[in-house]
Image: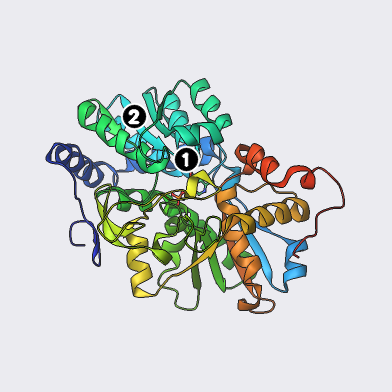
């Protein structure tokens, strides 16, 4: 691969001061990650500490209503409550073997912050987390968890006070602390080599899913579906299926309020190419290159950019990228909760919403897999605020309207 490029996207557009730690990381990936010491230790952590492999759950109630088999890959059942720990355990282990003693990271929904704080505690490292002040307010339960785990949480007041601004601050912090510190980037985005590193660590999701559906259904799925923020849970699910031409692969971006001209978090559908956070990718930006504010009800999708491999997969047409808005995600949250007894994260609810809204596009009696990237406990206040009493009663919810 041409130095971290995916077609025209990717690369390493960073200030000179960031080149040494990025080069050091790239060299460590080559030297340390293929060793038996690394792979054995990571496998042990993932299996016996984080809870892999995660189940592939068939949804009998929803399948009956939809007319095809709906399956969920249960990343919500991992330690910490989301897929993020696949990546943080891998990066923390790598950093430890590189001789680093500290981790710095960014977080939106707080799940990457929690997962990094968990990895740091387990591997006896310190942890600093930058989080937009708006996200600190809307994901307060995760802020409490990070602090409990010993992390130093810094609210970021600049810009839109969300994930984009948290990444800016984390990169600045890394410039100053690079000798002792590893930047545990939380998604498959940013400068090379992060998109490749995070994808490789998250691809365990798709590898397991492929083997599980072959064993349970005796065939490959008709479609795999995942929400796309920076893109890590999606690329982790998609990558092992890219060569299977018969499998439809669908990423779902957040359409925000869904009103024309209103903020969204859908750079693949509604953005243009540009450079942000060290990568050339699709961005929400003005014609003269100023980053526009994003919006999604789910903090983890609230980012004006996307990982460069998704930008390339979008350009090639191999992966479809659809949209689900805030209201559709809330409705999917409600439906899954009441039909299958599973509380999904609002991020993952976007992927499910797409399937519910486009049910006619999937074959009767077919097999459709949604990556349930995280659990919804962190979103209780938002859902209660948005749905009010609707979720309190017994009979007011219509499933699969
Ligand atoms: C549960 C969950 N799913 C999805 C995402 C989006 O991130 P990514 O696109 O990197 O998977 C997040 C981000 O915080 C998350 O917490």
**Horizontal and vertical percent for residue 159?**
36, 39
The quadrant of the image that shows the C terminus is: bottom right
Marks 2 and 1, the one that precedes in the sequence: 1
The quadrant of the image that shows the N terminus is: bottom left
Residue 65 - label: none
Q: Within 8 Å of ligand 1, the CB of disc 2?
A: no
Is residue 73 something that shows in the picture? no
Tell me the residue at 40%/49% (across/down). 293
**Horizontal and vertical percent for residue 209?**
54, 59
Tell me the residue at 77%/56% (across/down). 339
Q: Is residue 328 left or right of residue 250?
A: right
Residue 342 vertical placement versus 223 (above, below): above
Tell me the residue at 21%/27% (across/down). 176
Task: Classify 10 Å Cα crowding around label 1: few (below 14), some (14-19), many (20 and above).
Answer: many
Tell me the residue at 47%/61% (across/down). 261
Q: Is residue 364 left or right of residue 196?
A: right
Q: Within 8 Å of ligand 1, the CB of disc 1?
A: no
**Horizontal and vertical percent for residue 21?**
19, 37
Q: Which residue is mark 1?
A: 85
Q: Which residue is mark 2?
A: 103
Residue 210 vertical placement versus 205 (above, below): below
**Horizontal and vertical percent for residue 283?**
34, 57
- Quadrant of res 307: bottom left
Between the residue at mark 2 and the residue at mark 1, the CA separation in whole angstroms equals: 14 Å
Q: Is residue 224 left or right of residue 241?
A: right
Secondary element at image label 2: strand
Is residue 346 something that shows in the picture? yes
Q: Residue furthest front?
A: 261
The reply to whether the C-beta atoms of the residues labelled 2 and 1 are less than 8 Å apart is no
């Amino acid at each position: 691969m041409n130095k971290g490029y995916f077609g025209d996207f990717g690369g390493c557009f960073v200030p000179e001061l960031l080149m040494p730690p990025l080069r050091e990381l790239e060299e460590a990936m080559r030297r340390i990650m293929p060793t038996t010491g690394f792979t054995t230790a990571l496998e042990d952590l993932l299996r016996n500490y984080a809870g892999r492999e995660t189940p592939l759950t068939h949804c009998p109630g929803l399948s009956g209503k939809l007319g095809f088999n709906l399956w969920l890959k249960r990343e919500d059942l991992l330690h910490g409550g989301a897929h993020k720990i696949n990546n943080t355990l891998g990066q923390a282990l790598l950093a430890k073997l590189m001789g680093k003693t500290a981790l710095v990271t960014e977080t939106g929904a707080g799940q990457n912050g929690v997962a990094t704080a968990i990895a740091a505690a387990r591997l006896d490292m310190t942890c600093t987390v930058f989080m937009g002040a708006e996200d600190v307010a809307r994901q307060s339960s995760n802020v409490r968890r990070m602090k409990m785990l010993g992390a130093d949480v810094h609210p970021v007041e600049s810009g839109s006070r969300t994930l984009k601004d948290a990444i800016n601050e984390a990169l600045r912090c890394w410039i100053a602390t690079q000798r002792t510190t590893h930047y545990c980037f939380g998604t498959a985005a940013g400068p090379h080599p992060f998109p490749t590193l995070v994808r490789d660590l998250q691809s365990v999701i798709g590898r397991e899913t492929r083997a599980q559906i072959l064993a349970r259904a005796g065939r490959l799925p008709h479609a795999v579906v995942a929400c796309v923020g920076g893109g890590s849970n999606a690329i982790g699910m998609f990558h092992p299926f890219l060569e299977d031409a018969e499998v439809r692969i669908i990423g779902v971006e957040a359409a925000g309020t869904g009103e024309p001209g209103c903020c969204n978090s859908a750079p693949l559908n509604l953005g243009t190419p540009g450079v942000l956070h060290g990568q050339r990718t699709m961005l929400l930006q003005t014609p003269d290159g100023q980053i526009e504010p994003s919006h999604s009800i789910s903090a983890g999708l609230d980012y004006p950019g996307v990982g460069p491999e998704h930008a390339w997969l979008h350009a090639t047409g191999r992966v479809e990228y659809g949209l689900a808005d805030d209201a559709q995600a809330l409705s999917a949250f409600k439906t899954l909760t009441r039909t299958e007894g599973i509380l999904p994260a609002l991020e993952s609810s976007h992927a499910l919403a797409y399937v519910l809204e486009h049910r006619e596009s999937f074959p009767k009696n077919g097999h459709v897999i949604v990556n349930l990237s995280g659990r919804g406990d962190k979103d209780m206040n938002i859902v209660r605020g948005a749905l009010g009493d609707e979720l309190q009663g017994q009979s007011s919810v219509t499933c699969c309207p």
